[in-house]
Each structure stands twice: as C-alpha cells, then as structure tokens.
Amino acid sequence: MDTPKNEMDDLLSNAMQFTEGEIPEPDKARYNKLRKKVGARKPKTNPLARLFNLEIKLYQAALAVTAVAIICLVFRPAIIPQGTENMGMPGSDTATAYKGSSLKSDSFLVKNFTSAIY
Amino acid sequence: MLYLKQGEVLAFDELYLRYSKRLLGYFIRMMNYDREKAQDLLHDVFLKVIEKPELFDRTRSFKTWIYTIAYNTCKNQYKHAGVVKEAHAELKSTEAVLDERFFITAAAKMDAVEFKKALHTELELLAEDKKTTFILRYQEDNSIAEIAEIMECSEGTVKSRIHYTLKILADRLKIYNPLN
C-alpha cells in the first residue's frame, strides 16, 4: 500500500520538476534511425502470397456463395423453350395488351410510355 | 507493443511521444546533467524496446517495464564509468533523526530556486540506488510499488531507501537552513 503524500513530499516533488526548456528535445536523427529499424521489422510479402495466406472464415465463404447464387438467379438470361414464342394467349404481349385495353389515349401512362412500347 | 512487434511505425511514434522526454529527464538527472550521455542512453532504451519486444510481459504495465530498462541501462553505465560513489558522510547521517518539518521550514526560509539548487547538488553526491529511488519517487512520480517493480526489490526496501535518503538530505541541507 502506498503512503499518501504529505507536505514534504509535495515540496520535494516540486523541487524535482524540470523548468520549461530545461529538458532538451530528444535527438531527431536518432529517432529517425529507430523508426527505420521498426519499419524494417514489417514482414514484406508479395500480393500473390498474401492471397494464398488469406484466412477466410466459414461464414464469410457461406455469405459469398449466397451472394453469387442470388446474382446468378437475378441476372440469368430468360430461358424460353424453343417453339413456344407465339404460344401465348392473343394479346398477352405488351403492345397487344395496350391495343386491346380500355386505357384512355390521353392518360399519363399512354402519353409517356407508348413510344417505349412500340 | 503488439503493433510495434509487427513493425508498425505509428505504434513506435506513440510510445516515443509518451516516454522519450520523461526518460530523457530521468537520464539527465541520473547522469548529473550530462545531456549528451542522456541522449545516448535514451537511444539505448528504445533500441532495446525495438529489438526485444518479446521480453515485455503483458501482465505488467509498459511504464514500469520501460523504466526497468532505463534503470538497468543507467546501472550498467554507472558500473562501466565507475561513477558509483558513496558520500563519506553518509553513514554518519543515518544516525540523524529525520525531521520532516525541516524541509518545509528550509523551503519557507530559503528561496525556492536556491533550495532546488541545493537539493540537486546534494542529490548528485548520493549513491546510485538511493539517487534512483529518490528520482523515481519525486521526479517521475512513481508509487512505492512501481519503484519496487522497476528496481526489482521489495516495497520495504524502497521505503527504507527513501527514508534513508531523506535523512541524508536533511542532514546535508541543514547548512542551507538560515535557522541553523
């Protein structure tokens, strides 16, 4: 257990403190040498080796697989069986659907999107 | 320390910023104001920290570890330079009774700068272990437990060294006390 500081301790502590400017700045050149020494400890590996040394956790692999699966499902090309292109019901394509619809020709939808349809 | 081990320069910068000036102050006092020698020793301490980071025990505080290195560096320097000297009057002084009021009265009667100068002059004459204990306690503001860890001795030894040193200083500083 440390004894609490008394008046004498305070007096001695004050007398032992350096005044401003009494301690010089640590030598910059030596400091830079030390820094270089620290930097030299850093292991240097080429990117390819780093790639092979990658530590991947199981959940990271699972997430990556799920993400790839979702991407594949969303962006896969539409697979339409051959010879079935015109087998839909008459008027099932967009243009025909529009022609046969009861939409008024001055409606917002028709005004803005008919050019895209045709 | 972990980052320093891995060669992170920024980790070193942080440690250097925190401890370099304090340690330089410690070495300046320990080396009797030889600033060039103090710079050398500061460099040695950080070199040891860099070269042997595995010696740092993570259960200990970094502060006590770096001070232990500083203390051992100083000790080696003292041994090497043969500067260990015991003042002749030391034994005689131990018989004197420590009067705590003395310091306070002396400081009150003396000019603060004069008291500081006298204290430092007398401190230079002290033996290395006593001087180190005193500096670690009153200059570096370490606790008794920390000093014991740094100097690898018991807390009782630290306390008795401080008491002993204060008695010596009180005895020597008597000549500066205008009352005597």
Image: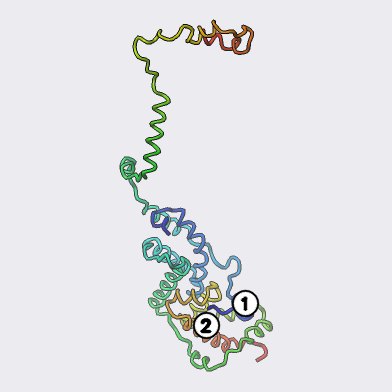
Asked if badge 1 and badge 2 are on a common chain, one would say no
| Residue marked by disc 2 | B162
Residue B33's spot in the image, x, y percent?
A: 51, 73
Give the quarter of the image for residue B103: bottom right
Secondary structure beneath dot 1 equals helix
> Could you tell me how far apart the alpha carbons at marks 1 and 2 are, in whole angstroms?
14 Å
Give the quarter of the image for residue B83: bottom left
Residue B173's spot in the image, x, y percent?
A: 59, 86
The residue under the point 40% across, 38% down is A63
Residue B106's spot in the image, x, y percent?
A: 65, 84
Q: Amino acid at mark 2?
A: Ile
Q: Amino acid at mark 1?
A: Asp
| Residue marked by disc 1 | A10
Residue B55 appearing in the image: yes
- Residue A58 as seen in the image, left or right of residue A118: left
Q: Tell me the quarter of the image containing the N terminus of chain B.
A: bottom left
- Residue A102 as seen in the image, left or right of residue A93: right
The residue under the point 46% across, 70% down is B64
Residue A68's spot in the image, x, y percent?
A: 39, 32
The residue under the point 59% across, 10% down is A110
Residue A33 appearing in the image: no
